[in-house]
Amino acid sequence: MKAGFRKIIDGQKAASSENESTDKMQTPKLYNISSDVKGTWYSVDDQNKMYKTTFTNHTMTSSDGDKSYNETWYLDDGSDPNDTENIHNNWACVAKDPIEKNGITSVNIRGWNPGSGAGSYFGTTSEDVDGILTTVLVSTSGAGAWCDAVYYRTAAMAKKQNTARSDDLEDAD
């Protein structure tokens, strides 16, 4: 403590446990988004609004034509989601273990500082689209991981399919 006062008198910054803990904080590891999810996907909702979502190595950017949202995906580092000193609005936390539902393995994504909720889930599967087996991205959410959107690789296919889904994808009501 005496050394800290000496530094202040000499016009230097005194070390504190707060400064030391801040210096020790590290950015968590980036999550590597799988190659089958990477790229641009399109979905149309029941109001005929087009959504475009692009996945890169570590980020997801979503747009509804009016607004755009970008987030970087990090592995869950066990930090306290209620820590007000650790707020990152454009960070998402990827759960360590994926879930399996209806034959689809999905990653669980939550905001870095979520208030509550199960978050969102993303996974790919093959669906029959006009007799052709097509890879689709399924977005689910909620405690039951209910399907809220199916994304396609082209805007034209998303428009054509609109909100059509196979019976194996449970809808959120």
Image (tube, rainbow, N blue to C red):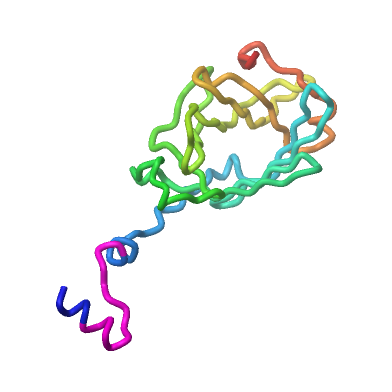
Viewer-closest of 64 and 134 = 64
Q: Is residue 72 visible?
A: yes
Q: Check the image and report above or below for 22 versus 158.
A: below
Q: Residue furthest left?
A: 2
Magenta segment boundaries in residue numbering:
6-18
Answer with left or right where residue 167 lies relative to residue 50: left
Expressed as whole percent of the image width and height from the top left, the position of residue 56 reads: 60, 51
Disc tally is 0
Residue 74 counted in the magenta span: no
Q: Check the image and report above or below for 164 versus 125.
A: above
Residue for point 32% across, 86% down? 11
Residue for point 75% across, 32% down? 43
Residue for point 28% across, 88% down? 10
Viewer-closest of 143 and 88 = 88
Viewer-closest of 14 and 72 = 14
Expressed as whole percent of the image width and height from the top left, the position of residue 86 reads: 42, 51
Expressed as whole percent of the image width and height from the top left, the position of residue 139 reads: 61, 29
Q: Check the image and report above or below for 111 versus 16.
A: above
Quarter of the view holding residue 52: top right
Q: Is residue 39 visible?
A: no
Answer with left or right where residue 137 lies relative to residue 86: right
The quadrant of the image that shows the N terminus is bottom left
Expressed as whole percent of the image width and height from the top left, the position of residue 16 reads: 26, 68
Residue for point 76% across, 21% down? 163
Q: Check the image and report above or below for 18 versus 90.
A: below
Answer with left or right where residue 122 lies relative to residue 19: right
Answer with left or right where residue 82 lies relative to residue 137: left
Residue 15 counted in the magenta span: yes
Q: Residue furthest top?
A: 167
The quadrant of the image that shows the C terminus is top right
